[in-house]
Image (cartoon, rainbow, N blue to C red):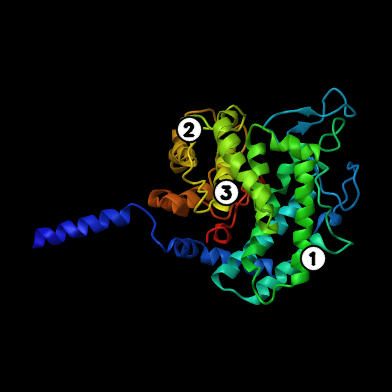
Amino acid sequence: MKKRLLYVILVIGAFIGQGLQAQDIDGVKTVLKRQVLAKAAWAMQQQPETVTAHRASRSTGGIHDFYSEGDYWWPNPVSVDSPYIQKDGQTNPDNFVAHRHAMIRFSRIVGALASAYRISPQQKYVKQVLVHCKAWFMDTATLMNPDLLYAQAIKGRATGRGIGIIDAIQLMEVVQGLRVMERDAAMDRNTLAATKKWFARFLEWLTTHQYGKDEMNAANNHGTCWVMQVAVFAKFTGNKELMQFCSDRYKKVLLPNQMARDGSFPKELARTKPYGYSLFNLDAMTTICQVLSTKSDDLWNYETPDGRSIKNGLEFLYPFIADKNKWPYRQDVMYWDNWPVAQPALVFGAVAFKKNDWFNTWKKLDHAPETEEVIRNLPVRNPLIWIQ
């Protein structure tokens, strides 16, 4: 009898040890609760700050146009008036990034408030989010135009580039935060409708302008991020056709063209920051799976005919997230010491595949990074609002 009881205990223990259980979201809440509520208290005190608060002297656009400058472009030492030259992976601290900072701040405010709402659904969080959304998407004095015609410009070379579309990944948690709060009685329907209209116009630009087409066809993380943000914005606006397009593109283009058979991303490994870019691309791909997967179209468990899958990507990178010292490739030229942080790929993957080791590693990592480069390249900073 004792042997039988011991056997039952061992079997149950083995089953439990295989992965996370039904209370996955509660486990994430437990890890993040104190931090989330502290961030929400900060967010409740913030006033809106949009692109109109910062005039970019080198922008050829207007006051309502988002503007940024390519990170890796520097003055030519031959002449200060010459076109900028590229130093891949090396960020020029003197380039204009005030609009990007404002957008990141907006994202952090809404992400914090929506996360707090998932823990304690109070109407004050909804009302504060609406104040910021009105400023960004409705108020004719402060709104941002729904395009990125002047993003990642290069002095002497380009007034804007398709590559700048990646800057708008910062709007994803704004949209997801609104989805979390959408049914609350305090949600102003006019503001919500106007915001959805803004993103519908932005989606039209992303999918029809040459900059958008160029970014969609990018063969590295830029192509991934185009799919990721279009998927998020399409889901918010109810554009099922675009959602299906993004799902198909993930299966037919991103996985087969970007992932090697071993789960690595060769184009990211070839960059001067192979570790950071590999993490970034994996985060983006797992976010696509998180946003678009359904019972009938499960991207988490999709495999290409030759066996490439998002699980391969997670299994390839996980050992190097758990212990970066095992990384067999060259170190990043900048910010090597700042990665990894609490990568969303880990927590999304842990929940999807019931992997306790991935979840426990995620728990131990930094959930509140302050390094600007890390924040910019962390598309999901508030996993609570993404996990159902």
Where does label 3 land, which residue? 287
- Mark 1 secondary-structure assignment: helix
Question: What amino acid type is highlighted by mark number 2?
Answer: Pro
> What's the distance in space between the residues labelled 2 and 3, CA to CA?
22 Å
Pointer 1 local density, CA inside 10 Å: few below 14, some 14–19, many at least 20? some
Find residue 200 and report its horizontal and vertical position in percent.
Answer: 76, 54
Say which of 226 and 78 sits in front. 226
Where does label 1 land, which residue? 134
Q: Say whether residue 374 is visible.
A: no
Residue displayed at 66% across by 68% down: 182
Quarter occupied by residue 238:
bottom right
Q: Is residue 242 above or below residue 25?
A: above
The N terminus - image quarter: bottom left
Where does label 2 land, which residue? 305
Residue displayed at 59% across by 45% down: 247
Q: Say whether residue 250 is visible.
A: yes
Q: Nearer the viewer, mark 2 or mark 1?
A: 2
> What's the distance in space between the residues labelled 1 and 3, CA to CA?
27 Å
Question: What amino acid type is highlighted by mark number 3?
Answer: Thr
